Amino acid sequence: MAAVSSSPKSPFCGLRSPRGGAVGRFFSHGSSRTLTCSLRFPAQLGPLFWPWEKVKIGPLTVSPMGFGTWAWGNQLLWGYKEEMDDSLRETFNLAVRSGINFFDTADSYETGRFNGRSEMLLGKFIREYKDKVRDNIVIATKFAAYPWRLTSGQFLRACKSSLNRMQLDQIGVGQLHWSTANYAPLQELALWDGLVAMYEKGLVRAVGVSNYGPKQLLKIHDYLKSRGVPLCSAQIQFSLLSFGDDQIELKALCDSLGIQLISYSPLGLGMLTGKYSASKLPRGPRAVLFRQILPRLDRLLHSLRGIAQRRDKTMSQVAINWCICKGTIPIPGVKSVRQAEENLGSLGWRLSSDEISELESAARDCPRKMIQNIFQTQ
């Protein structure tokens, strides 16, 4: 089979399918594109990981990687336009055909008139997917701790609004997007009670939190436990660019409490992809951050690039695979079929212990880390 020499390295090259054989031809948009491997992959994709690699979030079973949908409606940071919706549908369909059944969203992702767009699109794509596998799709959405959500009833209504936008009867994981402990501690308990209410009413199958540090995580875990509600997930910024003692401590706590850690921004908003440099910055607000941090990531990017070349992978795939190897569920953002194809190449293989050590040593040596979310608590 002839290879397309001008195309970028295939995200599927070297990947061993659970069905046996290497992935060689990838089908998309109803046609095939020749990649650089020797065998063919069937048009109806199957999981790119083994069944035992699936992960539990409370009562739910999900793929070892999910996809984030922050860009699905966000104009300011990600340049969303309505004409992107067809491409987003194709991206979603590709992910599901490839075994991905975990999608993360939020009721605060979108900007302007596109408020709630990400949730709406996810619900629409699920309903339009003509296969029984859609029944296994797990949506995790986050409810913002807006200052006007002061009571458990108001937080419960936020959950119902998300269900209405998605036109679903139940959400997989309902998450508190951030803690108000740092600036409105009295509001925090009402929000926790809101999580209890949506769980007790069967509106969500599991509850989780986002941007919680170890101290607050232990507090909400114990409180929910006293109310008979298990805390099933904790979502934080977790990547080689943010790796340090805080992340290690939180991961250890999650393991001890039976809480699944979900890694958002596993590619550091794109800084770990190798696609940008000081002279090639992304458009929009990200450029300011990239200009400050990228020039000081030489050792980490060098390690990522070296391992990627030896593995016949991309830097993005190595960075995401590291998150998987650390026992987290990474949720890289996707807004195109091309991005989904590349991210899917993170599955079906594992970094060696030596490679993990090399990457972590380089990460610890970085003079600049990714800035923390302003709502992250201790």
Image (cartoon, rainbow, N blue to C red):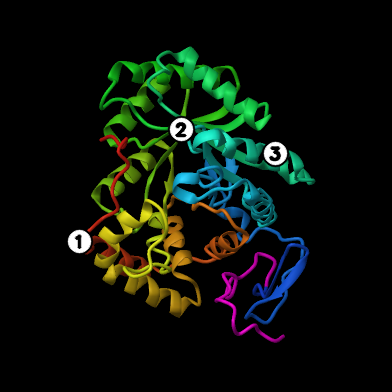
Answer above or below: position of 341 versus 113: below
Could you tell me how far apart the alpha carbons at marks 2 and 1 are, in whole angstroms? Answer: 32 Å
On the image, the x and y values in percent for residue 228 come to: 47, 19
In the picture of the structure, the residue carrying the numbered disc 2 is 208
Highlighted range, magenta: 1-20
On the image, the x and y values in percent for residue 336 come to: 59, 57
Residue at point 30% right, 47% down? 247
Q: Using the rendered image of the protein, determine whether residue 58 is visible from the camera's viewpoint.
A: no
Figure quadrant of the N terminus: bottom right
Answer above or below: position of 152 versus 44: above
Q: Amino acid at mark 3?
A: Lys
Disc 1 element: loop
Dot label at residue 367: 1
Figure quadrant of the C terminus: top left
On the image, the x and y values in percent for residue 111 come to: 49, 37
Mark 3 or mark 2: which comes first in sequence? 3
Q: Amino acid at mark 2?
A: Gly
Graded by Cα atoms within 10 Å as few (under 14), some (14 to 19) or many (20 or more), the crowding at tag 2 reads: many
Could you tell me how far apart the alpha carbons at marks 1 and 3 are, in whole angstroms? Answer: 44 Å
Determine the main secondary structure of the stretch shown in magenta: loop
In the picture of the structure, the residue carrying the numbered disc 3 is 124
Question: In terms of depth relative to the viewer, which is nearer, 238 or 260?
Answer: 238
Could you tell me how far apart the alpha carbons at marks 3 and 2 are, in whole angstroms? Answer: 24 Å
Mark 2 or mark 1: which comes first in sequence? 2
Answer above or below: position of 332 versus 274: above
On the image, the x and y values in percent for residue 371 come to: 28, 49
Q: Quadrant of residue 179?
A: top left
Question: In terms of depth relative to the viewer, which is nearer, 47 or 285?
Answer: 285
Nearer the camera: disc 2 or disc 1: 1
Q: Are marks 2 and 1 in contact (CB under 8 Å)?
A: no
Q: Is residue 205 left or right of residue 129?
A: left
